[in-house]
Amino acid sequence: MSRRPDIGARRPLPPPPDRKSLREAALAHLGRFAATERSLTLVLERRVTRWGRRAVEDGQESSAVADTVNSRLPLAAAIAKEMVTLGAVNDHDFARSRAARLTRSGRSRRAVQAQLSARGIDSPTTEQALDETLGQDEMARDAEIAAALIFARKRRAGPFQHAEQPDDAHDDADENHAGKKARLYGAFALAGFSRDVTDRALGMDAEEAESRILTLKASL
């Protein structure tokens, strides 16, 4: 009578990650996700450190495991750099693509900058990608206003408030309205939009607002 496999049993600990296995992991990751050089490095570093935790849990001596982990961690950055050389990772292209996608979703330029920085993209690359994607000067301002309009549409504010909602934008004596207006402007500020861009977006008529959003999305 054959024994059923122990479903709860842990899989045997694999050998520590080496260049070959980490390179295969990098290619598998890039086959599923877009990545920056820094984010790919972190993915591979986590693979090494996960092995280290497993090894200690399996009873291996912690100092020996630490030595192995520390000797393998530099491979993560080296392989990520190799992917850049091969063209599989391109921070500039990633920044342009992500900037366009985030702006279409109603993110401010400042919020896009923060997101790209969090992915390990340096400031010069970020600024160049933003200028190429969203333009400069008046073009950049138009893109920022359109992004603010998308943000307003998500909140059903400004040009996108419900028809049945009372338009009491000038009723400064209404304390309830004043509180709502303050919270709305606070939300725009937290999202990275300046006061003048927020004023422009919230004061726009619905037809122009929709036209600006369509123009932005067609250009990205």
Image (spheres, rainbow, N blue to C red):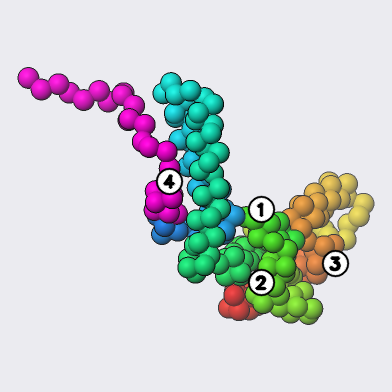
Q: Residue at x 21, y 25 (%)?
A: 5
Circle 1 or circle 4, nearest the eye: 4
Counting residues from the N terminus, which is met first, the one under dot 2 or under dot 3? 2
Residue 127, labelled with which disc? none
Q: In terms of secondary structure, where does tag 2 sit?
A: helix
Question: Left of 9 or right of it: where is 217?
Answer: right
Q: CA distance from mark 3 to mark 4?
A: 54 Å
Counting residues from the N terminus, which is met first, the one under dot 1 or under dot 4? 4
- The majority secondary structure of the magenta stretch comes to loop
Q: Residue at x 91, y 55 (%)?
A: 172
Residue 46, magenta (yes or no) = no
Q: In terms of secondary structure, where does tag 3 sit?
A: helix
Q: Position of residue 213 (x, y in %)?
A: 64, 73
Q: Position of residue 62 (x, y in %)?
A: 52, 25
Circle 4 or circle 2, nearest the eye: 4
Residue at numbered disc 3? 196
Residue at numbered disc 2? 129
Q: Residue at x 41, y 23 (%)?
A: 58
Q: How many numbered dots are placed on residues in this image? A: 4
Residue 16, magenta (yes or no) = yes
* Chain part drawn in magenta: 1-26
Circles 1, 2 touching at the beta carbon (< 8 Å): no
Residue at numbered disc 4? 18
Q: Position of residue 133 (x, y in %)?
A: 65, 75
Q: Amino acid at mark 1?
A: Ala
Circles 2, 3 touching at the beta carbon (< 8 Å): no
Q: Residue at x 69, y 61 (%)?
A: 122
In the foreground, 75 or 80: 75
Q: Dot 3: within a 10 Å radius of its alpha carbon, few (fewer than 14), some, or many (20 or more) residues?
A: few
Query: Residue 211's quadrant in the figure?
Result: bottom right
Q: Amino acid at mark 4?
A: Asp
